[in-house]
Image (cartoon, grey):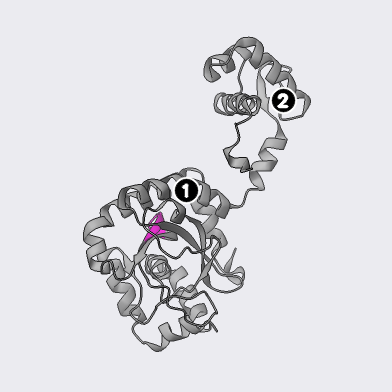
Amino acid sequence: MDMQRGKPVRAIERAFDVLLAVAELKPASLLEIQERSGLPRPTVARILKTLTEVGAIRRGMKDEKYHLAHVIADLARRLDPKDLLAEIAAPYLDELSSAIHWPAVVSVYEPDPGEYMLVLESSVKRSRFYVRPSATKAHINVLLSSLGVAYLAFLDEPRRAVVTARLRQSRDSHNLVGIAAGELEQRLEQVRRQGYAGRHPLYRGGSYNEPPADDGLSGLAVPLLHDDCAFGSLNVYWNRKAMKVEEAAVRHLERIREAANRVSAEAGRCLVAQSLLQGQWPADHRG
């Protein structure tokens, strides 16, 4: 039996509604929680009693209102910002794929160890067109892939200098090809000028530090930006024979940018973008 197709547990849904009400009101009375959640008063009272007993909320002695307990804050602090970005991006990737039909992915740079782009989330299963699926958490090289160059081109200058220096020392065969081509700076400038990146002509696919393997795909990527600095990238890919990158840009770039902007804005509001920017500094450059 597919557990995801089973009926949701209504009691858990209601408890979550109450927790959200407490979190939003900071703190909240029973009446305020009832009004915010839309649940019956007896139901809210029972849920509050249960949540208090398990330590998820507490009732203030002075104001007699309900507050989130420290255990909830501790759980939040344990969340990986990459997982949070995947969660933020998922509905926007789904919406984008519904509009343009091709799958989209969100990726971030991983400096230690490896210097590769890490795919966090993909809408490939929602695409109406078949492409060879790429696994979530896939490792993709930086210098030849569209998602890698979109990220690199829109880094601020200090970060780009550090990352580029590390990539020049990389043992990944794909990155070595990118360095040997001798036109990295010109390519980055072109990407900044046009606002998107395509795959390098020499790149046909293949995972980080693995032999080249033609996947039959093409890609178009734009950066995820916070304060004008990239903290990741959003990439759309399709069967190479279907269209050229320039045609894809004419057809879909506006929608792709809109999706990336919405992901970036929400990641900034939740402080995810800031956490990722700090984490993407190599360990020996972090303050």
Quadrant for residue 73, please give it.
Answer: top right
Q: Position of residue 236 (x, y in %)?
A: 37, 60
At horizontal 60% and vertical 19% (from top left) the residue drawn is: 28
Q: Secondary structure at mark 1?
A: helix
Magenta-drawn stretch contains 225? yes
On the question of residue 11 being in view, the answer is yes
Residue lying furthest front = 1
Q: State the image coordinates of residue 131 (x, y, percent, origin top left).
A: 41, 63
Q: Is residue 138 above or below residue 32?
A: below
Give the number of the mark in front: 2 or 1.
1
Q: Nearer the viewer, residue 286 or 231?
A: 231
Q: Is residue 267 visible?
A: no
Quarter of the image with the C terminus is bottom right
Q: Which residues are magenta?
A: 222-229
- First in sequence: mark 2 vs mark 1: 2
Q: Which residue is mark 1?
A: 90
Amino acid beneath label 1: Ala
Q: Main secondary structure of the magenta part?
A: strand
Would you say 11 lies left or right of 199 here? right
Taking the spot 38% from the left edge, 73% from the top edge, the residue there is 216
**Disc 2 secondary structure class:** helix
Q: Report x, y in % for residue 92.
A: 41, 47
What residue is drawn where x is 63% and y is 41%? 3
Residue 38 horizontal/vertical position (percent): 53, 16
Q: Nearer the viewer, residue 121 or 226?
A: 121
**Who is closer to the viewer here, 232 or 17?**
17
Dots 2, 1 in contact, CB < 8 A: no
Residue annotated with mark 2: 51
Q: Is 44 positioned to the left or the right of 184 in the image?
A: right
Quadrant of the drawing holding the N terminus:
top right
Label 2 amino acid?
A: Leu
Q: Up-down: is 64 above or below 219?
A: above
